[in-house]
Amino acid sequence: MDSPNFLPLADIEQLNFISLLVLSVLSAGVWVVLLTRKFQGRELIASRPTDEVPWGLIDVWIIMAIWFAGGLLGSLICSYRPDDKTFQSLMSGIMILATTALGIGLLWFRYRSKATGRIFPSRLLRDLGIGVVAFVAVVPPIFWLMSFLVQIVPYKHDTLERIKDSQTAFVLLASYFSAALAAPVGEEFFFRFVLQSWLQRLRFPDFPVHRFATIYGDFTHADSTILASGGCQPPDSFALKLLPIVVSALLFAAMHIGQGPAPIVLFVLGLALGYLFYKTGSILTCIVLHACLNFYSLTWESLRAIEQSIAN
């Protein structure tokens, strides 16, 4: 009796397609509920109160410098072990988390609870749930767009290249640590929590005390006193609300230049993450969405790499 003609790659692609179809159906359901409640005037996610973060442009620059210095240091360390894929993935994730911790430390040192109090969620389960629902809503359009673009330009990523070179358990675990844990934490901390929050300060009228705080940071919180007294309310302009989201999404996408069509797709993802952060005021919701998306993508890419290795 002839053995069946088993094509692992075809099966993986079919399973991936089926999973994306299932997510697409769930996504459509989420969007129907969201739009229905929107038209009824009952939004699922209430907008957070308008307020300002205490850090200024100088803090954004310092944290950016720390982040890039950490990346350069990690690359330098990895250059001494160029063939150790596990070490490279672990070092990448460790440096991302280390620079994020330094950034948090800087904000705490300068502004104490005014800054760090925004990081830790007050309603953990609610934020986790919103992040998962956002993942279901956003991922199918993102992946359908990506599946179209990769037909034109191949997708490249260092983590995927490491997995293709070696599919050992240690390489896979290190890749998940770097891509599905460290990267979402670090990128959401900088692009949404630090950068987008600071850009939102530009919505307020330009008073001298506010101009100083926007650049150097709010040491005395004098501008917060002005806001609390009602003397300086932000204009209710859609364009000014959208600008921080668009700018942070553009820079988030630009950081991934060189990864094929990824910048286009990640710009769309950045818009979704920015809007989610604007609505909830919670960095945890963005981290959950970003981490779930990376985990989902990395899982299928890992399965493809493993099956390709078996087929060869």
Image (spheres, rainbow, N blue to C red):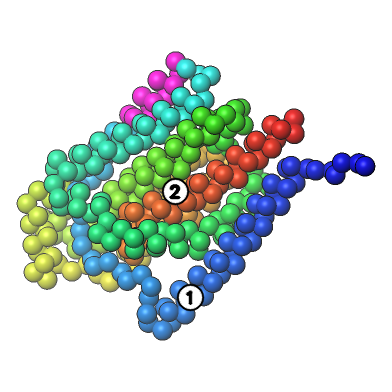
- Would residue 273 appear left or right of 104 to someone viewing this image? right
- In the image, what residue type sits under mark 1? Val
Q: Nearer the viewer, residue 243 or 34?
A: 34
Q: Nearer the viewer, residue 246 or 74?
A: 74
Q: Earlier in the sequence, mark 2 or mark 1?
A: 1
Q: In the rendered view of the protein, which quadrant contains the N terminus?
A: top right
Say if 229 sits above or below 95 in the image.
below
The answer to which image quadrant residue 228 occupies is bottom left
Question: In percent of the image, x 7 and y 57: which residue is there?
Answer: 222
**Residue lying farthest to the front in this orientation:** 1
Q: Majority secondary structure of the magenta segment? A: helix
- Would residue 284 appear left or right of 84 to someone viewing this image? left
The answer to which image quadrant residue 98 occupies is top left
Q: Position of residue 106 (x, y in %)?
A: 20, 39
Question: In percent of the image, x 19 and y 43: which residue is there?
Answer: 107
Provide the residue designation for mark 1. Answer: 33
Q: Position of residue 177 (x, y in %)?
A: 44, 37
Task: Let me know if residue 172 appears in the view.
Answer: yes
Q: In the rendered view of the protein, which quadrant contains the C terminus?
A: top right
Query: For the residue carrying disc 1, how many other residues have a C-alpha within 10 Å: few (<14), some (14-19), or many (20+)?
Result: few
Provide the residue designation for mark 2. Answer: 291
Say if 97 sits above or below 134 in the image.
above
- In the image, what residue type sits under mark 2? Ala
**Which residues fall within the magenta stretch?**
69-80
Query: For the residue carrying disc 2, how many other residues have a C-alpha within 10 Å: few (<14), some (14-19), or many (20+)?
Result: many
